Image (cartoon, helix red, strand yellow):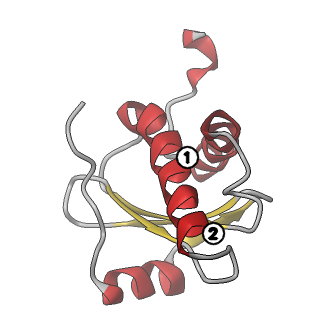
Amino acid sequence: MGKIAAITRNNDFRRAYRRGKSYVSPLLVTYALKNRLGGTRVGITTSKKVGNAVVRSRARRVLREAYRGLAPDVKPGYDLIFVARGRTPGAKSTQVQKHMERQLLAAGLLADRSETR
């Protein structure tokens, strides 16, 4: 699989927070907003509430790895923002992936994977 397109501009994040639909779990918050680009872009944020720099970096790595497993099944044409929560750094990426999968299914952005398992 290729590189994941990243959201890097502050106004893109702010637009997703303001206009996007949010989905909450104890491990992460997901914001989904339709874009006009045709492809899916992903942004990951961690606030200082999560911990120090090392802990925040781990949280970002865990979120990135969890998304990597789901990326082939995500509908194109959306901006996704994943926000780490306090429990994210202590979780395994497979745990986070289950929460992320539930949120993306609730958003209607994921083909139902239950038939393929």
The image quadrant of residue 46 is: bottom right
Q: Residue at x 53, y 41 (%)?
A: 66
Dot 2: within a 10 Å radius of its alpha carbon, few (fewer than 14), some, or many (20 or more) residues?
Answer: some
> What amino acid is at disc 2?
Ser
Q: Residue at x 46, y 32 (%)?
A: 69
Quarter that holds the N terminus = top left
Q: Residue at x 27, y 82 (%)?
A: 9
Q: Position of residue 25 (x, y in %)?
A: 76, 58
Q: Position of residue 85 (x, y in %)?
A: 70, 67
The image quadrant of residue 15 is: bottom left
Disc 2 target residue? 22
Disc 1 target residue? 108
Q: Is residue 97 found left or right of 37 in the rendered image?
A: right
Q: Position of residue 23 (x, y in %)?
A: 67, 62
The image quadrant of residue 56 is: bottom right
- Above or below, 32 against 94 in this view is below
Q: Nearer the viewer, mark 1 or mark 2?
A: 2
Q: Position of residue 115 (x, y in %)?
A: 60, 12
- Above or below, 106 against 35 in this view is above
- Above or below, 100 against 12 in this view is above
Residue occupying the far right of the picture:
26
